[in-house]
Image (cartoon, helix red, strand yellow):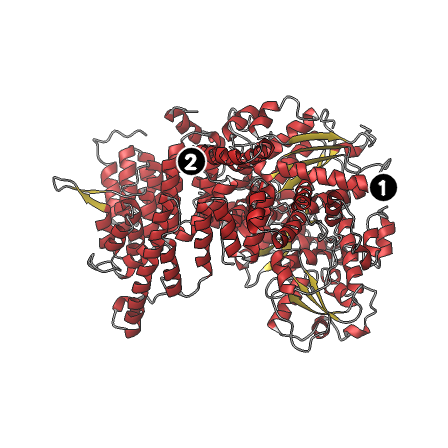
Amino acid sequence: MAFAGRRDAPEPPDFGILKRLARDQLVYLLEQLPGKKDLFIEADLMSPLDRIANVSILKQHDVDKLYKVETRPAPGASDQFCFLVRPRVRTMRFIADVTCDEWSFYLLPLDEDIISMELPEFFRDYFLEGDHRWINPVARALQLLNSLYGPFGKAYGIGRCAKMSHELWRDLEEESEGEGQGRKPEIGHVFLMDRDVDYVTALCSQVVYEGLVDDTFRIKCGSVDFGPDVTSSDRSIKVLLNAQDKVFSQIRNEHFSSVFGFLSQKSRNLQAQYDRRRGMDIKQMKDFVSQELKGLKQEHRLLSLHIGACESIMKKKTKQDFQETIKAEHSLLEGFDIRESTSFIEEHIDRQVSPIESLRLMCLLSITENGLIPKDYRSLKTQYLQSYGPEHLLTFHNLKRIGLLTEQAAGETLTAVESKVSKLVTDRAAGKITDAFNSLARKSNFRAISKKLGLIPRVEGEYDLKMPRDMAYVFGGAYVPLSCKIIEQVLERRGWQGLEEVVRLLNGNEFSVSDSTVEDNPAWESQRVILTVFLGGCTFSEIAALRFLGKERGCKFIFLTTAITNSARMMEAMIEARA
Amino acid sequence: MNRARADEEEYWHSSKFRAFTFDDEDDELSQLKESKRAVNSLRDIVDDDDDDLERVSWSGEPVGSISWSIKETASGSTSSLEGRDSSLQKGSSSYAALPKQVSSYSLSSLFKGRNKLPSFQSLSDALTDTGVKNYAPELRRPKAEYKDYSSDWSPKDTVRRMQRGKVCSLERFRSLQDKLVLLDEAVAGHDGNVITAVLIFLKRTLRREILFRELEVRQVALCHLIHFLRETGEQKLLLDLLRFLDRTEEVALSQYREHLNIQDVEKRREFLKGCIGLPFSAEDTSHIQDHYTLLERQIIIEANDRHLEMAGQSELFRKYPRKASILNMPLVTTLFYSCFYHYTEAEGTFSSPTNLKKTFKIPDKQYVLTALAARAKLRAWDDVDALLTTKNWLGYTKKKAPIGFHRVVEMLQRNNAPVQVLQEYVRLVEDVETRLNLATKYKCHDVVIETYRDLKDRIQLTAYKSKVERGSAEEEKINSILNNMQIRWKN
């Protein structure tokens, strides 16, 4: 990949075709069942489905009524039922006796550069439970993208799951006839990364606009519900947030502080545009109404929504002592004043500010410090259980297993179990077990990695958030997201050479594979288009950081993620709920 | 990495992060408010018709979307899509009158000017579009081809076929050796669903001890079985497996987890009692014990208070009816409740705050914090004062708070404390800047005046005169300070 010299980033490939493929497959499946039928849809498939089809399409294919999977059909309904569900043990048992067809709907393009698999449970299933059930869908997604936009000439990756997904994908490719050979690709590189390579970034409070909107209102399937406090009316509005939104697309990647200025500039311009009406004659007025008014109205609507959203975010964040929280976060990232941050977290818990936020801060403390010292661990845990409920004992257990919230020196007990088990089995198997235990006990080594990669910028004077100098701007200039820094470094070096120490600290599992059968023409734009695959979720802050990097280096990043995530979603995934 | 304190101070006070804060609501919001005014002033011109806006229902879902339709079905407002759609249509054309192929009816017609998806007619159109010819052939195959009754696939091929969604019979793997090879192949194939499918087969055809023993050295497969048993709720087998593996703590936690599914409080309490003896770590055992004791207390308190409330004799309950039951609430919430409704009770009763504090060894800091919140909510300012007052051995009193006084002020202010009460604590805020901000914000004139005097800031003090009422005691106070010749002003 040519990083040298500033060039304009290439345009992203057209991902609309993914939607059309999914829709046509669905139609095909519906046609397999001629006649009137009722359609049962699993709750979390509803929003993705909405993005690719609509009621009239379903109706054109004889769908009579629509139900959520939990609800029972009304008496006298159609005598054919069609279920759209994910292959989960729970739902399959509910549906019981049916014939199954597979609808290969893996990829939902959320935006011109974001494709989501809409699998939020990937995170818990793989990283907590160690279940490999979603690796096949990932490999098939890669296969599909490779066949439509590839062939990818080079694949990089880091993490166990990345490695397995890559292997399975190569395996699938080998079987296919290799029809992509000799075709000119639209995407040249692919980079796979496990979420557990970098938990720190995902745990940070987001301060770029899109991230803040996600943290505050939860963006779901590319759209958000703005409530009455945003719309200044008595109803909520569902808004699609993507590049088509002319206001949003200009502020989504900005640090929140730059957004206000932009919005006020925009509203002044808008006002000026409207003011031009004064002094127009009839003819001019007619032109104005027919040519410009519609656009202005649209802009007006978007502006007032985003201004309302900003206002609501400001109100909420001020109430939550956001400034102090960010200050504590920054000291954790930099590694000073740990005592003070620990007391801050303690007070946060004691005041019952928010169960999810308290957990997040504890995890951030643990990951940046390679575990809590036992005294702190016990005391914070006790206070947490007292403030938020004793059943969170289970949450703590989960967080310990996944490695997000650990106690220092826990390594000793693991070694004991390990050696005990090792005695029972052969050497080869013992190796595997040690491996498995290592994954449980893996240390984050954040401090050392941060130093090696220079994640904490040391800048003289003020960090100008309006004119960012590096990816750290997405965290107010305080921290360069680790995940994005790794991607930058590997692409720059065309591999892992020179990063050996970092790789060791990240617990290995890195790879870099060139497909020798693919023509490697440096003149092709595809050489500057990189598909980044986040296994276990990616945040809007990371997306903003890489979009920034892409602009700087004249390349285009495409995001394929198992789901859009943020700290709250990750924490919620660790909480045990009623069965 | 230890930096000198001075360094840190300087760091945080450097301009790096001060350009923008989420604290200065007024400053930052003023710009926003201005924009909002500008935009709102245009509303009259703009809102004459809503034609180009997408149509949304009251719940915010775009009308005609699938999510919206499902909500409609659930609420039973219309019986089928047909009826609903015709009611949607502008004009009188009904669904039947519409030609089926045309998507004039689609969402994009509702989202005028927004959704420019080309309307796609058929599969073949899509396939000829961008050279995707080779992708979808799998789809067109008749279903029967997925099934496969040939029985001589090797373990590796069997796994491969399963990975590609084909049905394979596993029955021919009879010997333990064959089954284990199959399992290892499944693991090597990285497909969790295949691993689980093989495990279901093994679970059905192997003796437990053998299955457990073999899984002990196959961690990946073991994780899959444990996860599967959890999901299907096969608790007994799961516990047997965990016991076999000597994972006693997980045994305990898995059993404890079941309490979440018990609705009835009495049954839940009994169940928790049984959990106390489970093999938790020493630390967790005491948490479980506390959980049990807490619920036991809550049941007693709930019964008493419900009775009290219904009898209508207690003024407190009449004035502040309970919003929810105290059952299953966290300890801190229970303490708050008890400080709210049972503050003055003697230590002997289960519902008294002191009793709770003692039983659960609640730290002083947590106790004072919670009691403060509860008493402030009741606007019992004397209690608040007492909580914040400590006496030393000489009998001198001193104000002391477990958290910064700026937080105390916030808490009191939220409960509409009068200025006289507020100002006493604003005065105690250590950081001068914060103190001035709070005092100005909440109009604690005395504190502002005294702080400027102490800062010897004549300009600010003079300026503040405009903020107080003319002829008031405050104005007089400012004047007398300004006229005091002994103060050496810094400006």
The percent position of residue B187, horizontal first and vertical second, equals 66, 42
Residue under label 1? A177
Q: Residue furthest bottom?
A: A76
Q: Of A306 and A6, which appears nearest the observer?
A: A6
Q: Is residue B75 left or right of residue A105?
A: left
Q: Would residue B281 be seen by someone viewing this image from the given angle?
A: yes
Residue indicated by mark 2: A372
Mark 2 or mark 1: name the one nearer the start of the chain.
Answer: 1
Going by the numbered disc 1, the residue's amino acid type is Glu
**Which residue is nearer to you in this view: A53 or A83?**
A83
Residue B262's x, y, as percent?
A: 44, 62
Could you say which is closer to the camera, residue B322 or residue A387? A387
Q: Is residue A6 above or below residue A305?
A: above
Badge 2 density bin: few <14, some 14–19, many ≥20, Cα 10 Å: many
* Res A358 → quadrant: top left
The image quadrant that residue B390 belongs to is top left
Q: Position of residue A39 (x, y in %)?
A: 70, 66
